[in-house]
Image (cartoon, grey):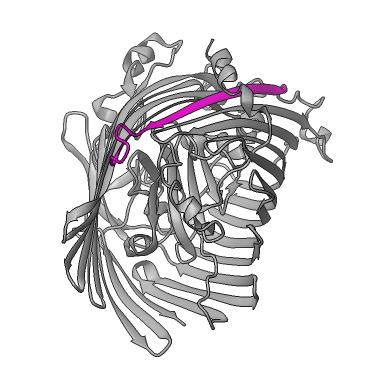
């Protein structure tokens, strides 16, 4: 019945459609667009941009995202450690990450390492629950339970300017050496270019304290050591072309990332040093073209080609010698249309095609090929005090396996079966209501049903993959409000308060279970079911304390009750895990970000708290993880001489030198420092 209801709502959305230009493009339509641009978001995003983004003691995109409510970051330690993000406890694979409007993908394991993306070239990071509150977007934008949008810097020149140059040099703890340079050039009246290069090198060596307790509370281990094999060397190069059209714009980007890093591994069985290494080479080329063809019709075209290489080496023969290489390819094309039916009613149609392939040097590995078609129909009704957005996403996935040379030599008698074709229809509905015509209060709610495909590793990884896996489904319900206004006192410039209560279900959750009687062989199965109840709240304000003295404050808090209701054959295990908080999800977490600026001086402070957790759904004392928190601060001074702008800053992270772990047995650094010099012309 739910599906029929949504289809009836969206029946008018069969025709193609049009939308407003992005916020950056409002100069083309002048004041016509500015009036409704913020209220056009039925579910507003959490954003970090401009000076507030630069003020954080954040080295990568992953570090900055920690300050959003509803977010859990998994950090495996060290400056080069893997960093993945989870929104509202639904799992990392349900989060879509978009880089300049096009999704970053990883068909192999579904995880995007946000530690690979620097903040030096980023203008804004936005987090949306459900999906972005716009209908003029690719079908991919509708296909995740939550989305992160990373928007990089676009060249902007004042009258008479033809180029910009920015250079950043950092040094600090862990033998850090980091250089970044950005060059922006005005090529023609409506054409500009940019090139950004960054190099990072670090030994990743830091002292830590390792303590463990017995179940009766007595001390089992208490020692200090130096984190080993956490070194990283990485090079990132980005180049872009940016063009302005009559009532439109386009851009093209090349991205290349090359790194070698040690994998420090978990501290277990009294082993303090690991020998595993990983090499990554990531390349993609993407382009986006958007134009208002007429007053009633807009067109958006996105194209992308990506090629990724990853090599993993474990030379430790006492465990299992492994030297595997993986090659991924992705081809993506998208067309989105939008019509303005009336001044307050828009409808849209977008269609995407994506091709993914994976090759591996593993013995017996059969390369999978995946073709994905997505079609999204959407409609938006924007009245004076009520906004309604609805969409239906149709997804079709076809896969096949391709035999390669040496397949028979690996001992296989015939080609294994590929995963069956999948067809899914996913509806969503978003509403935002302003009770008073000119009031600052907005009430919002949404429902969304979506799924995520099993990854290639889930389906085909040698010996543990299961080609019969079904997609993992989520159902999201949200009710919240936002109250914001300009200050009515001379010292209070603006302030905002928002809160959301939500209920999520994750069905057919993909988990690893023992295969046979032994615990050394595993298989992927659809056995999981999780219910998540939570509250996200945030408050922020900007203060003008004097003519030259400003301050800002942002508070966020998250409560989550994420319970595992998975049916298990082992009744004893069932009793231990039934209704338990799922691994690494705290019930309480929050952050504080504060800053002050006086003339050329800037001081910033941030605090993160993560409450008690368990590293297993069996919420017993043996699986208990203590709360952790960190204090970070920075002090910077700006200098100016003619056209040269300079800034020197000192950052202190983990000010109180806390011993903590985000993931069990992966100790994080104690107090550490960074010194940075930035030059801009």
Which one is in front, 595 or 387? 387
Q: On the rendered structure, is 186 left or right of 570?
A: right
Q: In this rendering, is residue 105 above or below 391?
A: below
Residue 78 sits above or below residue 369 on the image: below
User: Residue 47 in magenta?
Assistant: no
Q: Quadrant of residue 580?
A: top left
Q: Residue at x 77, y 35 (%)?
A: 410
Left or right of 52: which side holds 27?
right
Q: Which of 476 and 120 is in front in this view?
A: 476
Q: Measured from the top left, where is residue 28 in percent x and y?
A: 56, 59
**In the image, what residue occupies the spot 56% across and 70% down?**
196
**Which quadrant of the structure image shows residue 433?**
top left
Q: Does the magenta stretch include residue 434?
A: yes
Residue 651 visible at all:
yes
Question: Is residue 598 shown left or right of residue 15?
Answer: left
At x 62%, y 72%, the residue is: 192
Residue 609 visible in the displayed image? no
Q: Nearer the viewer, residue 41 or 602?
A: 41
Can you give x and y, in whole percent of width and height, for residue 249 in the image?
63, 59
Quadrant position of residue 460: top right
Quadrant of the drawing holding the N terminus? top right
How many numbered discs sit on the rendered protein? 0
Magenta span covers which residues?
420-442
In this view, which residue lies farthest toward the bottom?
A: 642
Tell me which residue sits at (51%, 58%) in the image. 30
Q: Is residue 526 above or below residue 189?
A: above
Image spot of residue 366 (x, y percent) = 75, 35
The majority secondary structure of the magenta stretch comes to strand
Q: What is the x, y in percent for residue 72?
A: 37, 41
């Amino acid at each position: 019945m739910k599906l029929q209801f949504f289809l009836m709502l969206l029946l008018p959305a069969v025709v193609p459609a049009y939308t407003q230009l992005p916020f950056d493009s409002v100069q083309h339509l002048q004041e016509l667009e500015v009036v409704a641009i913020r209220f056009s978001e039925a579910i507003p995003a959490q954003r970090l941009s401009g000076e507030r983004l630069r003020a954080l003691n954040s080295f990568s995109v992953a570090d900055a995202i920690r300050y959003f409510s509803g977010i859990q970051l998994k950090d495996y330690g060290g400056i080069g450690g893997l960093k993945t993000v989870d929104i509202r406890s639904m799992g990392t694979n349900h989060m879509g990450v978009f880089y300049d409007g096009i999704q970053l993908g990883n068909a192999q394991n579904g995880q995007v390492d946000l530690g690979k993306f620097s903040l030096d070239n980023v203008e804004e990071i936005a987090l949306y629950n459900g999906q972005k509150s716009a209908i003029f977007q690719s079908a991919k934008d509708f296909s995740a339970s939550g989305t992160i949008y990373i928007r990089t810097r676009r060249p902007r020149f004042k009258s008479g300017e033809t180029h910009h140059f920015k250079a950043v040099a950092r040094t600090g703890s862990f033998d850090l050496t980091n250089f970044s340079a950005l060059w922006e050039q005005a090529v023609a009246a409506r054409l500009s270019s940019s090139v950004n290069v960054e190099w990072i090198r670090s030994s990743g060596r830091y002292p830590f304290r390792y303590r463990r307790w017995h179940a009766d509370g007595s001390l089992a281990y208490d020692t200090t050591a130096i984190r080993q094999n956490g070194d990283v060397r990485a090079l990132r190069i980005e180049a872009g072309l940016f063009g302005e059209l009559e009532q439109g714009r386009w851009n093209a980007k090349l991205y290349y990332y090359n790194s070698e890093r040690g994998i420090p591994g978990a501290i277990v069985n009294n082993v303090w040093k690991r020998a595993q290494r990983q090499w990554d080479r990531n390349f993609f080329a993407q382009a986006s073209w958007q134009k208002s063809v007429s007053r009633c019709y807009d067109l958006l075209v996105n194209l992308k080609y990506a090629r990724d290489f990853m090599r993993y080496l474990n030379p430790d023969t006492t465990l299992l010698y492994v030297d595997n290489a993986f090659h991924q390819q992705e081809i993506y094309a998208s067309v989105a249309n939008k019509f303005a039916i009336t001044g307050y009613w828009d409808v849209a149609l977008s269609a995407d095609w994506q091709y993914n392939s994976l090759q591996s040097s593993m013995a017996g590995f059969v390369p999978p090929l995946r073709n994905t078609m997505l079609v999204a129909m959407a409609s938006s009704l924007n009245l004076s005090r009520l906004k309604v957005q609805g969409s239906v996403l149709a997804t079709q996935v076809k896969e096949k396996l391709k035999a390669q040379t040496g397949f028979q030599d690996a001992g296989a008698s015939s080609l294994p079966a590929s995963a069956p074709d999948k067809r899914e229809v996913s509806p969503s509905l978003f509403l935002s209501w302003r009770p008073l015509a000119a009031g600052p209060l907005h009430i919002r709610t949404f429902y969304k049903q979506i799924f995520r495909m099993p990854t290639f590793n889930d389906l085909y990884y040698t010996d543990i993959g299961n080609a019969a896996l079904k997609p993992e489904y989520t159902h999201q319900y949200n009710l919240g409000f936002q109250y914001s206004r300009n200050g009515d006192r001379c010292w209070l410039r603006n302030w905002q308060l928002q809160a959301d209560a939500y209920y999520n279900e994750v069905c057919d959750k993909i988990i690893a279970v023992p295969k046979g009687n032994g615990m050394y062989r595993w298989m992927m199965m659809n056995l999981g079911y999780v219910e998540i109840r939570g509250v996200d709240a945030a408050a922020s304000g900007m203060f003008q304390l004097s003519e030259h003295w400003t301050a800002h404050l942002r508070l966020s808090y998250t409560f989550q009750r994420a319970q595992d209701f998975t049916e298990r054959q082992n009744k004893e295990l069932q009793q231990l895990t039934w209704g338990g908080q799922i691994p690494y999800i705290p019930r309480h977490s929050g952050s504080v970000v504060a800053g002050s600026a006086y003339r050329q001086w800037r001081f910033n402070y941030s605090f993160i708290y993560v409450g008690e957790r368990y590293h297993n759904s069996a919420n017993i004392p043996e699986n208990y993880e203590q709360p952790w928190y960190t204090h970070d601060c920075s002090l910077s001074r700006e200098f100016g001489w003619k056209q040269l702008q300079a800034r020197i800053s000192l950052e202190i992270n983990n000010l109180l030198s806390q011993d903590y772990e985000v993931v069990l047995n992966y100790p994080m650094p104690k107090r550490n420092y960074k010194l940075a010099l930035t030059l801009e012309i």
